[in-house]
Structure formats: structure tokens, C-alpha cells
Amino acid sequence: LCCFLAGSAWVCGLLSWARPERWLAPCSLFPLSCIHTSTSLQKFGKWEKKNRIVYPPQLPGEPRRPAEIYHCRREIKYSKDKMWYLAKLIKGMSIDQALAQLEFNDKKGAKVIKEVLLEAQELAVRNHNVEFKSNLHIAESMTGRGRYVKRIRYHGKGMFGIMKIVRCHYFVKLVEGPPPPPEPPRTGFDQAKEYVQQLRSRTLVNTL
Amino acid sequence: ALVVVFSPLPRLRGLLQRCWGRLERGLLPGFSGCQSPPWGPALAVQAPAFLPQPVNDTRESNEAPSLLESILWMAAPKKRRTIEVNRCRRRNPNKLIKVKRNIDVCPECGNLKQKHVLCGYCYAKVKAETRLIRLEIHKKEGGPFNAPTVETVVLYDGEKPTEKNEGKRIIERARKRPSWFVQN
């Protein structure tokens, strides 16, 4: 069993050989098999690390900081563009409304996002000291591109095409509290007011 | 290329061909040779750079345009669509998913349901129970094509067949009657 350790560098750490699961794994003949690769034990991305920030305790006079919960799911077998429509749908909704909309949506990503939201709700209540699980709203919901894999797609007459197996990530940030009211659409009057304000705030240079 | 086409006067045609022959061979132009200048009033047309061949080689009547030529008339994008144009198309409100306003709460189980659709949870419950009843029926009948010609009645724990259910086939289910299965 120790033969495959002979070629490995001490850099991988003295304890790495002592891990029992390593010994029970099928013995490969590569000498560098016990080097700690990045895929082991789930590398944490930036979104997962956002849950770890700890704020200093609030002073008595300050308004209460609402709880923020960051959750994501990686490498979902779906297209990021198609997932974006669902993410855009639930942006800014309360979590109950979002779950209702996703339940009766026919897309494949709707089921995945529903699971993610329920998981995030669970996490909020358990770890992040949220009192009411309905008192959450979705502050941000985004999609990202996952790892693409290229494969050959066979056509007739010996022709072929290269297809991409597409995957995506989904990120969501839940914030405690009722959802913010939707901002009213910008009217022409608002735009005119802003323009006049811009003109008034100009300063004249190189003059008295 | 702009080419001056000669007005093909019958006598000058032969001369024309000879003059052009000499031109093409790189000799002096036909000015010195012919009496009248070959450059008569003529029509200027857009033509390919080489002079069209004289009429002697008979061209066949216009055959059907082959695939190689019809490619020239196929529609193809002229320019790459920029990401701004693509975004305008993909994020147009008619492409975004509409918010559904016909979702209610089922009064029986409390799950969400659409107004014009049966509640999914209650339907699944009924479906499961129906499946078990059908298993019982299957056990009683024993095989295909053994369905009796009388009605069927399902009785749960502690229920006796009344005089209303006289001639009917009885299916026994070994559980309490579910609240949604009303007995009449």
C-alpha cells in the first residue's frame, strides 16, 4: 500500500498519507495520487464566503441591521441564459411569492431554483437567526456560467458538429424584512427635472 | 468596368474583330489601319472587365441555375449582431416570464393551487388511494376480462353493506375511511 507514496513529495503534507479514506480507496499506480487537488472537499467560491463575514456588535442607537443570507448552487445542468429569465422573474419578490411563481412555472430551472430557495430559507432560520421564515425577500438573484464541456454531435453524411454541454450556477441573496416597494417608472417630467438640474450644476471655468 | 460597345455596323464588324485582334496581341491600335475611326457614337454599359465574346459561340438557352449560383441569392447576415442589439431582443418585456396572478391556497390541504386546476397534493392523495383500490379489484378478479356486470362499492373498516348495496360487488379496504371519500 505504501508503494505509491514513495514517489510523492513531502509538500503534500505529512498527514495526507495517514487519512484512512485514502487507504480504502482503490490503489492507483500514479506516484502523485495523494496530492491535495482543488476539487477535493468542495472549493469555496466568493459567494459561499460571503456568509462568513461578521459585523461588529451594533451600538444601542443604530437601526437594526437586517440579516443577509447568501446561497448558491453550482454546476446546474441548464443554460445560463434560460436561467436568467427565472432569476429576473423572482428578483425583488418576497420568498413566498417567489416560491408560488416557481411552483407553477414549467421550466426545468424553476424546480432547481425552488430547491435552492427552500434550502436558503432553512439555513436562514437555523444559522442566521431569522425569526420568521416568511419575512425574507430576495435582494439579488443571479446566474453565472459553469464549466462547459465540448462534445461531438454526429450529423448525416459523415458531417459532425461540436456541441457544448452547458452548465450554470445560480446565486441568491435573501434579506430579512418585507420586500422593498417597486420604484415608480421614470416619467418624462423626472427626466426633464434631472436635465435642468444638470444644467444648473455646471460651473464656469477660467472666469471671474 | 466601363466598356464602350461599338454599334455593330455590318461592314465594320469584320474590321472590328481584326482591330481587336491586333489590340489583344499588343500591336498598334486600329487607328492607322482603318479609314474611319472605329469610335462611333456608342452606348456605355456596365460590363465585366473582359469584352463579351462575339456571338459566334452559341450559348445554350438559360439552363436552371445550379446550386453554386443560387448560393449568391441566399439570405445571410451582413454584420455581426452586437451584444447591445442582442440584449434589447432578449430582454424585451414580451420575452420575460409573466408573473402569474391566478395562484390561490387550497382550502383542503393548504398547498398552493392554480385557480382553474385541481390541487396537486389532493390529486396525488386521491390517485394513491385509487391505485390501492384497483389492486384490491385486481386481486378479486384474478385476471383480465373478469369484470362483473354489477356496480362496485368500496367499504372501509367497520362498515357493513346496507340494503342499498344489495347486488353490488364489495371491495374491502383495510383502513379508516378517508375524509374526502364520502359514503352515500
Image (cartoon, rainbow, N blue to C red):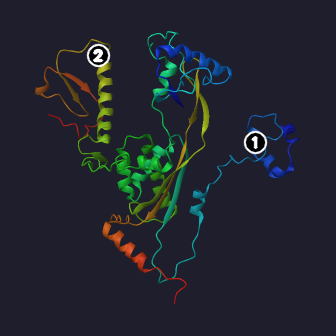
Query: Residue A113, can we see it?
Result: no
Query: Residue B10, can we see it?
Result: yes
- Badge 1 crowding class, 10 Å Cα cut-off, few under 14, some 14 to 19, many 20 or more, is few
Disc 2 marks which residue?
Answer: B141
Residue plotted at (55% across, 42% down): A167
Secondary structure, mark 2, is helix
Residue plotted at (57% across, 35% down): A164
The residue type indicated by label 2 comes to Glu
- Give the label on residue A163, or none: none
Which of the 4 quarters of the picture holds residue A147?
top right
The residue type indicated by label 1 comes to Arg
Disc 2 from disc 1: Cα separation:
58 Å
- Give the label on residue A22, or none: 1
Image location (x, y in percent) of residue B153? 20, 26
Residue plotted at (30% across, 24% down): B134
The foreground one among A163 and A138 is A163
The foreground one among A34 and B26 is B26
Residue A177 higher or lower than B89, as above or below: below
